[in-house]
Image (tube, helix red, strand yellow):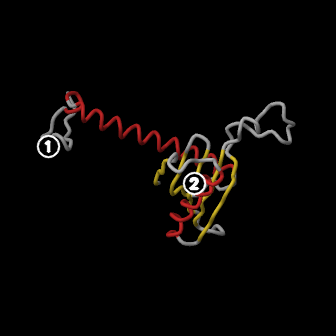
Amino acid sequence: MPHYQTCRRHPQAGPFLAECYGCKRELFDIQARNEAEAARRKTARAALTLIGTPAAEILTADVTDTTLIVATRQPGAYFEYAVDVFRLPTAEETDPELADDYRLNAGQWLLIWQAGNHDRSAVTDMVRDAHAFLTESGLAAVDDTELVAA
């Protein structure tokens, strides 16, 4: 028995998944966005765990290939709202020829910048400052990040 459902293209109930390419595409896009957001959250959670805040509520996660900006809320912390900026180590920093004391682990996020505030309205400005820091540091271009709201 077919599953009947309506969509914005078809106000009358019908087996649109089997017949409507637009509906199939829309459902695929929704699933792809959900999977990408879950992957970003997992990445952000792993980075937060490294700095000792695994239980912080993730408000936003901005991810590129080599950088990560995470805005969090953690009631009871020194600053309730925080923005942490991470980067991945470079190939030179993970070179096996380096002594153990100087070699970094490939794929492990490094904390490079932080900001905090007691007011939620400051989060947008802190994220903007984090992007500016990455741009000034040469770690990210102005338009190479993707903002994901929690």
Q: How many marks?
A: 2
Secondary structure, mark 1, is loop
Q: Are marks 1 and 2 in contact (CB under 8 Å)?
A: no
Instruction: Give the farthest residue toward the left.
Output: 12
User: Residue 140's mark?
Assistant: none
Mark 1 vs mark 2, foreground winner is: 2
Q: Residue at x 55, y 46 (%)?
A: 63
Instruction: Give the farthest residue toward the bottom.
Output: 118
How packed is label 1: few (under 14 Cα within 10 Å), some, or many (20 or more)?
A: few
Residue on which disc 1 sits: 11
Q: Residue at x 30, y 34 (%)?
A: 25
- Residue 125 is situated, as x and y percent measured from the top left of the image, at 53, 65
Q: On the picture, is 149 further left or further right than 140?
A: left
- Residue 69 is situated, as x and y percent measured from the top left of the image, at 58, 52
Q: Residue at x 38, y 38 (%)?
A: 31
Depicted 129 relative to depicted 140: above or below: below
- Residue 13 is situated, as x and y percent measured from the top left of the image, at 15, 39
Q: Amino acid at mark 2?
A: Val
Q: Locate the N terminus and report the quarter of the image it occupies.
A: top left
Earlier residue among tags 1 and 2: 1
Q: Amino acid at mark 1?
A: Pro
For residue 81, which quarter of the picture?
bottom right
Residue on which disc 2 sits: 70
Q: Residue at x 28, y 32 (%)?
A: 24
Depicted 136 relative to depicted 125: above or below: above
Q: On the picture, is 101 further left or further right than 127?
A: right
How far separated are the C-alphas under marks 1 and 2? 40 Å
Q: Nearer the viewer, residue 26 or 142?
A: 142
Secondary structure, mark 2, is strand
- Residue 91 is situated, as x and y percent measured from the top left of the image, at 72, 35
Q: Nearer the viewer, residue 69 or 41?
A: 69
